[in-house]
Image (cartoon, rainbow, N blue to C red):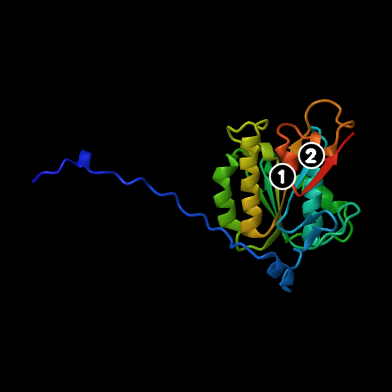
Amino acid sequence: MSIDANKIPQCEPQPAKLKLPPIENAAMLLADPTVEEPPAIIEGVLHQGSKAVLASNSKARKTWILLDLALCVATGGKWWKWPTKKGRVLYINFELQRAFVHKRLHSLCENKEDVTDISNLDVWNLRGKAAPLGRLVPEIISLIKDTKYSLVIIDPIYKGLGGRDENAAGDISELCNELEQVAVETGAAVVFAAHFSKGNQAGKDAMDRISGSGVWARDADAIITLTK
C-alpha cells in the first residue's frame, strides 16, 4: 500500500509556553517578611534591577558623564551629589574607539581623589560590532549572568536599534523589553544614553525631551536629563 505524503494531515507547531511567575494573593504578599527593596545603586535615583535613561542634546558629554558614573559605582564614590553603592560595572561602548575610552578613563581617574583601584569596572568595546539589540541580548546575558554586575551601561542606545524606527512605539517597546530582560536575567541596573530631539528643550517636560517615541521615557524607572 502506498501513502501519499501530501495527504497526511500536518500538525501545526505549538508555541513554546512562557515561563511566568505564579499569581500571588495580595494578603500573602503583604504578609511575606522576606520582601525587601533591591539595593540602591545610586541613592535616591536608581535601584539594582531597574532601568534608567540619561538624555541630552548631542555632544553634551553624555559619554563622559556615564564613564564617570561607571567609575563612581565601581569605586563606591559619590556621583555628583548622590552616594553610590560599590559594585561591579560593565560599560558597553558602541561609539568610541578603544584609545579614546582609555584617554577619557585616564583623565577621569586623574581628577578624582583616592581612585587607585578600578578593577570593578569592565569595558566591552563594540565599536563597529553594533547589531540589533535583540540579537545581542542573548550573548550579553550569557556572558554576564554569573558575573554579579550591579550596573550595566549601554552607550549609546541608538546603535542597538537595527532597522527599527525610534519614532515607532511598537519598535521602541520591543527594544525596552530587551533592556528589561538584561536587568531581570542578570539582576543589574541598566542605564543607557539617548538623545534629545532638535531645538531648545528647556521649555518641555523631562518626559518629552527625548527624540523619538514617548516610550523611551515612559518605560524607564529613572530619567536623568541634561538641559541647557
**Which element carries disc 2, helix, strand or loop?**
strand
Q: Is residue 98 left or right of 43 when viewed as pictured?
A: left
Q: Quadrant of residue 74?
A: bottom right
Q: Which residue is mark 2?
A: 55
Residue in view at x 60 percent, y 60 percent: 145
Horizontal relation, residue 96 to residue 77: left or right: left
The residue lying toward the viewer, choosing from 169 and 65, is 169
Q: How many marks?
A: 2
| Residue drawn at point x = 58 percent, y = 32 percent | 163
Under mark 2, the amino acid is Ala
Mark 1 lies on residue? 219
Please, what is the three-letter code of the amino acid marked with disc 1? Asp
Disc nearer the start of the sequence (1/2) = 2
Residue 106 image point, x, y percent: 79, 50
Q: Residue furthest bottom?
A: 33
Asked whether the viewer can see residue 208, the reply is yes
Front in this rendered view, residue 5 or 109: 5
Q: Nearer the viewer, residue 118 or 139?
A: 139
Q: Please state if 110 lies on the left or on the right of 133 as rendered.
A: right
For the point 71% across and 31% down, the residue is 212
Q: Within 10 Å of the Cα at label 2, are there few (<14), some (14-19), or many (20+) other Cα atoms?
A: many
Quarter location, residue 63: top right
